[in-house]
Image (cartoon, rainbow, N blue to C red):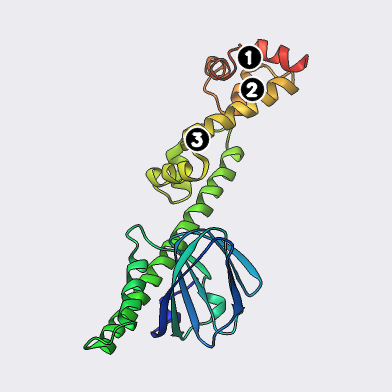
Amino acid sequence: MLHKSLIDKIHIRSGGAYEDSKGSVYPLHMHDHWELVYYRRGEVVTTIDGMKYEVHPGVIMLTPPGEAHTDYGATACSNFFIGLDIDADPQQVSRRFLDDGQNAIRDCCQAIVNELNHHNAYRSEMLRCFEDQLLILIERAHQAEQEDEHHIITTRQMIAYMPEHLSEPIRIQDIAAAHHSAVSTMRDWFYKLYDCSPQQYLSKLRFDQARELIGSSDLKLAAVARTCGFDSISHLSRAIKKRTGMSPGALRKQLQNA
């Protein structure tokens, strides 16, 4: 990931706007400087140093010097391209990142291109301001990317944690605390990744394990309830009835005779 300690300064060398039709192929090429491309419109498949990326509006691709790249327009498309001098390790910089909800990087690129295309007074001073702004916006975008990656990893750790503690009377707040997360943050990321709340996910895990034990074993319902973390046989029965429309006994008969 890009980190501010790796980049002290950037310098704008060139820039412009580009658009093309569906099915267009931009020739394979490389530069002696970094290139930032902001995709404004359309769906594009870009290839950088042999790696393919599917991009859409709001995606930014950052290509180091000496890496060959090309674009294929899956639809009509347009972008801004900015040539930059950056002092950074290419292995530490993400190739792909996203603009924020206010399209701040898009607006900055638009302003840079406009300034490059006109010889206004104080042009050099204005470009230096844009260099500082662009550096901060790139830093913010990568920071947001790191935070998202952290939350995704934490959510997957919670998913792995649940089956291991299913027989325990665990609560969602206990799982969140065990992973140093707020319950509200946990809930947000479960909806983003799994389209359900943590409680709904946990309840389904309990039901799935109970169904498996009812269908594949002769365990008494009290033991099934205990193993799957239900408070009582009646709690287990209500959960089975809600999801299947059958009592645990009827479900066992159906599964074992199937």
**Residue carrying label 1:** 248
Asked whether 252 or 119 is in front, the reply is 119
Question: What residue sits 53% from the left and 58% below the top?
Answer: 75
Q: Residues within 10 Å of mark 1 (few under 14, many from 20)?
A: many
Cα separation, mark 2 vs mark 1, equals 10 Å
Give the residue displayed 59% in from the left and 62% down from the top. 23
* Disc nearest the viewer among 2 and 1: 1
Toward which corner of the image does residue 65 lie, by quadrant?
A: bottom right
Image vertical order of residue 79 relative to residue 251, above or below: below
Q: Amino acid at mark 3?
A: Ile
Label 3 and label 2: CA atoms lie apart by 17 Å
Q: Which residue is at a point 60% across and 76% down the rendered structure image?
A: 27
- Examine the rendered structure and indicate whether residue 95 appears above or below residue 187: below
Residue 189 marker: none
Cβ–Cβ under 8 Å for marks 2 and 1: yes
- Marks 1/3 in contact by CB < 8 Å: the verdict is no
In percent of width and height, residue 29 lies at 59, 80
What type is the residue that disc 1 sits on? Pro
Give residue 98's quadrant in the image.
bottom left
Instruction: Please report whichever mark, 2 or 1, sits nearer to the chain's N-terminal start.
Output: 2
The percent position of residue 235, horizontal first and vertical second, equals 52, 18
**Left or right of 171 in this view: 70:** right
Instruction: Report x, y in % for residue 234.
Output: 53, 14
- Disc 3, SS: loop
Of residues 139 and 130, the one nearer the viewer is 130
Q: CA distance from mark 1 to mark 3?
A: 23 Å
The residue beneath circle 3 is 170
